[in-house]
Image: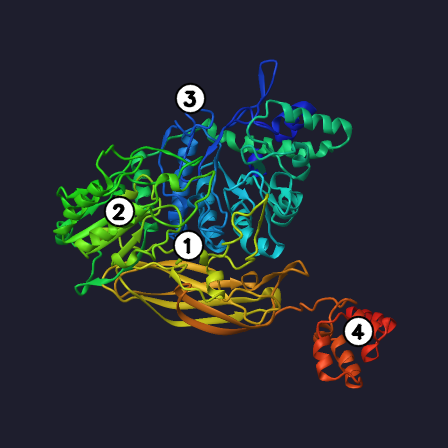
Amino acid sequence: MDDDAAAPFDVERVLASLTLEEKASLLSGLDFWHTQPVVRDGQTVVPSVMVTDGPHGLRKQADGADHLGIGDSVPATCFPTAAALGSSWDADLLRRVGEALGRETRANDVAVLLGPGVNIKRSPLCGRNFEYFSEDPVVAGALATALVEGVQSRGVGTSLKHFAANNQEADRMRVSADVDERTLREIYLPAFERVVTRAQPWTVMCAYNKVNGVYASQHDWLLTTVLRDEWGFDGLVVSDWGAVRDRVAGVAAGLDLEMPSSGGRTDAEVVAAVRSGALDEAEVDAAARRVLRLVARSLPALDAPGSFDVDAHHTLAREAAAAGTVLLRNDPVDGAPLLPLAPEALAGVAVVGELARTPRYQGAGSSQVNPTRLDDALGALRAAAGADLPFAPGYAVAEGPADDRSPEALVAEAVETARGAGTVLVFLGLPAAYESEGYDRDHLDLPADQVALLRAVAAANPRVVVVLAGGSAISVAPWQDAAPALLTGWLGGQAGGSAVADVLTGAVTPSGKLTETLPLRLEDTPAHGSFPGELGHVRYGEGVLVGYRWYDARKVDVAYPFGHGLSYTTFAYDDTTAEVTGSGTGSRVRVTTRVTNTGAVAGAEVVQVYVGDPHAQVQRPERELKAFAKVRLEPGESQVVALDLDARDLSYWHPVLRRWVIEGGEFRVAVGASSRDLRAELAVDVTGEDVTLPLRELSTLGEALAHPVAGPVVRRALDGSPIDPGMLAMATDMPLAVIADFGLAGFDRDALARLVEDANA
């Protein structure tokens, strides 16, 4: 690697000097957060480096903290979680957030920030969805790539996680994700692939779970065949903490570093396996080399850690939280939308809901950051109004101030507070205990006391704006009729309170878009009935129909579709074109559209390009996101947006040929503002490649008839056969070998063998 030339020590020279025992020791941690050093005669041969949790902020264990460090970590900027960052659809913003994370990581003498997570939101119940970007791999891959590039530009590493098919917390350390290869290739692997091939993260973290019966930590196909051989990953594979079940099998499969320390137990297992011939020492060398290369590329930053601007990073966190806030609804009341709040309207606002005062700003578990400061929405709104806006908590949360009043008394106070207000801002959301690493949610509902509060307040004053907080989809259908305006700030990080105030007051025009569908009911969701599995297995029976792909295929109504998000301005699309160039694996489509800001304020629109292939050999989603761009426009300004699709964007993973294929024919290319707000749809003809399947004796009669070589031969034989049409229809799905055995159409086994040979020649 180029990094090695400037490294303080030569990786190959050091490796050649190590004993087998020393090499094996490098492949596990020193403790919970540090790699193993090698020290001889008081001299450090290989230094130790520190890794620590992310992904939306540094969670470095403070001295004397518990071994996980969750209860006490050094202060760091708590940026919005991935659910909020993803909703910005803004790669440039994610790159800047990554740069800030990199600066803080470097300033704290940490070599690798453990993140980002790019697992797909298979079910909205997953307790860790707040750490993941999207239900769609294109969004997740593009934004994670930008984040990784930003972090690593500061001379520190990232750890792309959790590889792979880690889509639930229930039984996460043992469960087998049973998923077919096509679904893996099209849904659960592409985000990892994009980040690896475009940004080369320093490390990739394997998941706890099994994939089709094999633990990810010892999955040769995942860690070597796909990750290294196909994608060209040149970094280090580290285990999730405690994910290693068989260290020797892991090393053989491509696992380089087990974390945390095993106290030397598994180091001895590796040495014994080499001594016995069960493990090739060359595999130990390969893993040790990758550890040494990680150390080498970490040392320059550790020698010059630098510092960071706490205030500037807080300002960036505020910008990012506002960009990820999604305005779901803004219906007129008395002839005009409630939002944004003009200065005179802000002066008459009442604020209801404890979450306005006690913000829910991040998830629980290993990503929990100790923020450098914390903004709350109530304080930010009062500052914007220049007045002490009336407030009532309405309900209690465990993290808030003690309140001995009954739920009924809290609601009564809120109703009185709301009654005379010009507009009521009601802050609702998921309590911290509802979602966390380590367990999944049981339902999509808000707490019943919050819904009761909203109903009571709306009965007293219909001018209600609901502000939601939470890390994943919430069922809004049962109560949103009480809220003419509705927005979600997700888990917006330490500046989320100020960011929400910016959006409510119009200081920032909302431009966030949903990266996950908000369903009407849990029962409508794709994995319902097969999540989280049973008896150690979870079956991915929905296949590639994940998220909006499922709702579109089933024609299921949703509360708000993937890609949806309103603005305080409006956008028009026209002059949409799609031009095809090349053919087969060289096919490309350039999509252009002109977007115009037709409103009165500046704003940003996310242009989304979807592709459908209605005539493929396999079932493909009705439409799939393949490209997007965020464009900022002044009032009246237009811009032509051009997005390029390549052959991969038009392809699917063929389950028989086991490769990406592009079939020729008509494709549908749609451009729009969400998956269900399509402003233009065009048909394009693409010249595909030959995807004719090999003919076999067990191929069906129908497959033989469709074969370009065998078809005419079989058809001529049938023309002279006494088989009536009814029998022919019944025989279409009959294997050729059976037809030959029955003596139908004049075929016998010899004739069939010649036909197969000629067809495949």
Between discs 2 and 3, the one toward the N terminus? 3
Res 63 label: 3
Whether residue 744 is visible here, answered yes or no, is: yes
Per the image, label 3 sits on a secondary structure element best described as loop
Residue 422: x, y in percent? 14, 54
Q: Amino acid at mark 2?
A: Phe
Q: Nearer the viewer, residue 517 or 86?
A: 517
Q: Residue at x 28, y 64 (%)?
A: 570
Q: CB under 8 Å between callouts 2 and 3? A: no
Residue pointed to by mark 4: 739
Which label lies toward us, 1 or 2? Answer: 2
- Amino acid type at circle 1 is Thr
**Closer to us: mark 2 or mark 3?**
2
Question: 54 above or below 332?
Answer: above
State the SS at label 4: helix
- Characterize the local packing of mark 4: few (<14), some (14-19) or many (20 or more) Cα atoms within 10 angstroms: many
